[in-house]
């Protein structure tokens, strides 16, 4: 147990440059406090003491501003930065070394029993205000940008942004920044992320330039053959 506590304290130093001392982390970090409450509440939940577990998680929400259902499964070295407004649903599964920022929701989209919340692979980073909804999977080391709304599976090591979320990096690029290469990106952002809409528009413009160049070449060749090729043509003609 003490080894797990040591891990969770150390990971805060790794991911938050504002952390200065162990005493500060233990006494001032709501994410750390929420995880302490959750470990106890989860143990009670799996021992059949469901009401007591829910009551303890409600106390945790009141004190930390973070709501974690005691039925949620959370791996090791989990870090919640700032924390206020984080909601983690009952059937959520979170792997090791994941990071959530404030305002994140791991929510359900169904009133039916069973798996209805997301599954996060190891090393996932979810930016502030993002909503990951439904029984979907977010692949290992994937990143969800701030305020994104994710309703479909996210591939391993991909970066998604927007509403609804779309892939802007597939994780295969060699020009990722240093934080990304280390497996962590603050607020799940990347300075060199490529928006797919911008890429599509660039491809269309490049194609249009190529078509214009070919037409100019054809008109020039026709004029050399003595064919009159006017610069403008009436639509009715």
Image (cartoon, grey):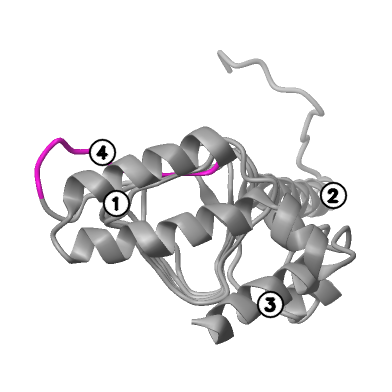
| Mark number displayed over residue 220 | 2
Q: Is residue 198 above or below residue 94?
A: above
Q: Which is in the foreground here, disc 2 or disc 4?
A: 4
Mark 2 or mark 3, which is nearer the start of the sequence?
Answer: 3
Q: Residues within 10 Å of mark 4 (few under 14, many from 20)?
A: few
Residue marked by disc 3:
183
Real-space Cα distance between discs 3 and 1? 24 Å
49 vs 96, nearest the viewer? 49
Mark 4 or mark 1, which is nearer the start of the sequence?
Answer: 4
Query: Disc 4 vs disc 3: Cβ atoms closer than 8 Å?
Result: no
207 vs 133, nearest the viewer? 133
Residue marked by disc 1:
117
Mark 3 or mark 4, which is nearer the start of the sequence?
Answer: 4
Real-space Cα distance between discs 3 and 2? 55 Å
Q: Which is in the foreground here, disc 1 or disc 2?
A: 1
Q: Quadrant of residue 14?
A: bottom right
Mark 4 or mark 2, which is nearer the start of the sequence?
Answer: 4
Mark 1 or mark 3, which is nearer the start of the sequence?
Answer: 1
Residue marked by disc 4:
109
Q: Is residue 140 left or right of residue 12?
A: left
The residues colored magenta run 104-113
Q: Is residue 165 left or right of residue 235?
A: left
Q: Is residue 190 visible?
A: no
| Magenta: main secondary structure | loop
Q: Which is in the foreground here, disc 3 or disc 2?
A: 3
The stretch drawn in magenta includes residue 58: no
């Amino acid at each position: 147990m003490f080894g797990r506590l040591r891990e969770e304290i150390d990971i805060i130093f790794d991911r938050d440059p504002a952390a200065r001392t162990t005493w500060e982390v233990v006494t001032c970090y709501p994410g750390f406090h929420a995880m302490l409450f959750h470990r106890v509440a989860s143990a009670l939940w799996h021992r059949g003491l469901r009401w007591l577990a829910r009551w303890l998680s409600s106390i945790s929400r009141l004190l930390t501003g973070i709501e974690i259902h005691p039925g949620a499964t959370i791996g090791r070295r989990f870090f919640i930065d700032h924390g206020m407004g984080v909601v983690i649903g009952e059937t959520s599964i979170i792997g090791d070394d994941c990071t959530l920022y404030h305002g994140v929701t791991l929510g359900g989209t169904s009133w039916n029993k069973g798996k209805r919340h997301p599954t996060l692979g190891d090393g996932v980073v979810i930016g502030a205000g993002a909503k990951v909804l439904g029984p979907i999977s977010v692949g290992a080391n994937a990143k969800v940008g701030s305020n994104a709304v994710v309703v479909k599976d996210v591939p391993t090591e991909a970066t998604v942004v927007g509403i609804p979320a779309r892939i802007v990096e597939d994780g295969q690029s060699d020009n990722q920044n240093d934080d990304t290469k280390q497996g962590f990106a603050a607020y799940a952002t990347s300075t060199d992320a490529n928006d797919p809409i911008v890429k599509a528009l660039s491809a269309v413009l490049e194609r249009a330039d190529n078509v214009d160049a070919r037409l100019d070449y054809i008109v020039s060749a026709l004029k050399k053959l003595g064919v009159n090729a006017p610069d403008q043509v009436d639509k009715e003609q």
